[in-house]
């Protein structure tokens, strides 16, 4: 069994994912390791924080270093020296957002590399082959990702094509080492399309189910409404993964609605741009009001990094464009995200999710000492 | 006593520097922490490698974060969270190399900040005041730095002015907490000027003596010739510091000639540009021949970082412009520089410096496995 639910509180679940490279307690946030590294983080530092799973991008790994190199190393774990679970996306999202001259066909998508313009044709089969070379614990079916759009025909067509590709992906999935394959429910913000997509995806049958096509411009309110009617459509005994989400508040609200897994570039990207997440709210460390501030990012944090450096020093590092600034804030933000998930897991376990969430919201709203 | 010599081998010395924030064994290489951080390195990682002293730049600290912030923190140690010794230069070298519109006067130098164009007038007194705010263990007198030049009048004038500034610096030095003040011998590559500068600097009297005005374009041969006649002019019982030097080979040859202390941006800057120093010679990791190379940077290294990552992975990180590449190679290069100094200290202690140096040279020349 891939997934074991230990406790529930309302719709929220506290469970264990059993993966080839280790166990992962849920709800879980997965740091994004786009190009074979979680940017500015040594893997030991990820372990020090307590992360048990990271995400890698199939599109990027395919273009660089490429399957031949990955095959030579027996997969990404050995290449990047991370021995814990990895989840890979299918490549579909990056093709939409990064590559030039994409053209969708029934059996795949033409695209040009954003690095050198070289042309490729990504099919469900190729996506599964790349993910096989990466050797990830959890692999995703290829889907057609579209931006938020109110044109229902566009959304429906993308959903239908994604269903077809899901079937082809499953056929091409390399069943070995107890790796898992997740399906993706599409359908934009339309309840009927979501219902259809969920039912058909479940019919194909997967180890877990992702909710795709959200956090693409629809806004938090519509996203949460979509979760309200989509999550209950998913099997209770399988892990649920909300792709590319999100802010700390997004995570809270999605966990409350029964989502188990998340990934997002937000904590790492924000960290590189001088934005720190704390239990008291967000801090833009570049703000000159911090230039003489001796207090740490969060004096209540038990994290040795978060409580070590003064805001004045971090302000100085960002003003001076020093790499160490990115290293420290990336660590602090990932630590905060992980700490948030620990709090949520404990709250579900103790049947105190509402109470815990209210406390978290209250502290954010107060913005004490910021 | 600031300096205790434990052993000598020929002109080379193995000693102990006793500084306010700790003891430092010599010969020693000091990593450069230009803007209050050794670029891309957590201070814990510097400690992990074994560094006991770093250098900070007075010019940079003065412009950013500025003396008011440093005073507020009681000095740079507390600001950057490094509790071991710090040496500061005087600011003279950066004014020459970085700032705009410098104009030298008898009692100081006008310059414009390279950051915002703001005008300042750096005098020996101000340099000592800034270094007092930094609170460094070893402080340097203000000197006039010039590029390599064959015009003896220019060299002589700069030397004479530096002597005057050395006296003024000593007068303005804040004698507290057993901090040390070093003089700087100038005179370009002219034996007479070096002799005069050494004698006059020694007359003023300092805790240690630096050799300045080298590694500014004269080439290694002329630099070593200059050391040949300059080092013997210095007091035997005081530490000798060759400023801004250098390559691994420079360090070997200068240690052989009796130099005790070094600093250079080379290992950190090279690391950020994909150049690795190893006991088998230099590696440019961006070279495509490493794209499938499973071996680490140096398989003979006992360093856990140097032996951990494959060349193929590091090649990938540099091709992908990932911060982690800079982090790893900076670590590897600093580790190599420190390891080299450990070997030299042991060799002097065991009276085997020539033998050890020959072995080091032989391995470099062979370029095995590179």
Image: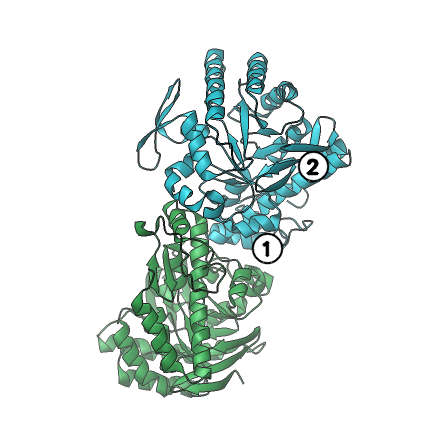
Chain colours: A green, B cyan
Q: Is residue A114 visible?
A: yes
Q: Chain of mark 2?
A: B
Circle 2 crowding by C-alpha within 10 Å: few under 14, some 14–19, many from 20: many
Residue in the picture at 77% in, 34% down: B352
Residue in the picture at 65% in, 43% down: B339
Q: Are marks 1 and 2 on the same chain?
A: yes
The quadrant of the rendering that contains the N terminus of chain B is top right
Element carrying mark 1: loop
- Viewed as shown, does residue A8 lie left or right of B114? right
Picture layout, residue B177 above or below residue B331: above
Circle 1 crowding by C-alpha within 10 Å: few under 14, some 14–19, many from 20: many
A337 and B294: which is toward the camera: A337
Instruction: Indicate the position of residue A151 as horizontal and vertical percent values.
Output: 21, 75
Disc 1 + disc 2, Cβ < 8 Å: no
The residue beneath circle 2 is B344
Element carrying mark 2: helix
Q: CA distance from mark 1 to mark 2?
A: 27 Å
Residue in the picture at 52% in, 23% down: B213
Picture layout, residue A153 above or below residue B130: below
Name the image quarter holding residue B218. top right
The quadrant of the rendering that contains the C terminus of chain B is top right
The residue beneath circle 1 is B309
A154 and B195: which is toward the camera: B195
Residue in the picture at 69% in, 28% down: B256
Q: Is residue A168 visible?
A: no
Name the image quarter holding residue A320. top left
A171 and B239: which is toward the camera: B239
Labels in figure, total: 2
Q: Chain of mark 1?
A: B
């Amino acid at each position: 069994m891939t997934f074991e639910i230990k406790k529930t509180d309302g719709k929220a679940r506290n469970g264990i994912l059993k993966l080839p490279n280790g166990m992962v307690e849920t709800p879980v946030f997965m740091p994004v390791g786009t190009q074979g590294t979680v940017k500015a983080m040594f893997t030991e530092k990820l372990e020090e924080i307590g992360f048990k799973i990271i995400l890698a991008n199939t599109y990027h790994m395919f273009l660089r270093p490429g399957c031949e190199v990955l095959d030579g190393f027996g997969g990404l774990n050995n290449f990047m020296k991370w021995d814990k679970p990895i989840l890979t996306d299918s490549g579909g999202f990056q093709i939409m957002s990064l590559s030039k001259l994409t053209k969708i066909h029934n059996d795949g998508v033409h695209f040009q590399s954003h690095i050198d313009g070289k042309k490729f044709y990504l099919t469900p089969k190729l996506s599964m082959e790349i993910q096989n070379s990466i050797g990830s614990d959890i692999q995703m079916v290829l889907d057609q990702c579209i931006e938020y759009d109110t044109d229902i025909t566009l959304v429906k067509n993308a959903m239908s094509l994604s269903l077809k590709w899901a079937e082809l992906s499953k056929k091409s999935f390399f069943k070995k080492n107890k790796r898992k394959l997740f399906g993706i429910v599409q359908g934009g913000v339309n309840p009927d399309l979501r219902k259809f997509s969920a039912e058909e995806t479940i019919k194909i049958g997967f180890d877990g189910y992702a909710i795709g096509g959200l956090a693409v411009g629809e806004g938090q309110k519509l996203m949460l409404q979509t979760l309200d009617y989509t999550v209950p459509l998913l099997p209770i005994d399988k892990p649920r993964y909300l792709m590319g989400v999100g802010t700390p508040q997004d995570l809270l609200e999605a966990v409350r609605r029964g989502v188990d897994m998340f990934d997002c570039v937000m904590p790492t990207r924000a960290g590189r741009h001088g934005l720190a997440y704390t239990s008291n709210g967000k801090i833009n460390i570049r703000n000159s009001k911090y230039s003489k501030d001796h207090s740490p990012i969060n004096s209540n944090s038990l994290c040795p990094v978060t409580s070590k450096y003064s805001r004045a020093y971090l302000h100085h590092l960002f003003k001076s464009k020093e790499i160490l600034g990115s290293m420290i804030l990336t660590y602090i933000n990932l630590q905060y995200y992980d700490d948030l998930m620990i709090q949520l897991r404990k709250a579900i376990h103790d049947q105190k999710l509402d109470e815990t969430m209210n406390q978290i919201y209250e502290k954010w709203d107060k913005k004490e000492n910021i």
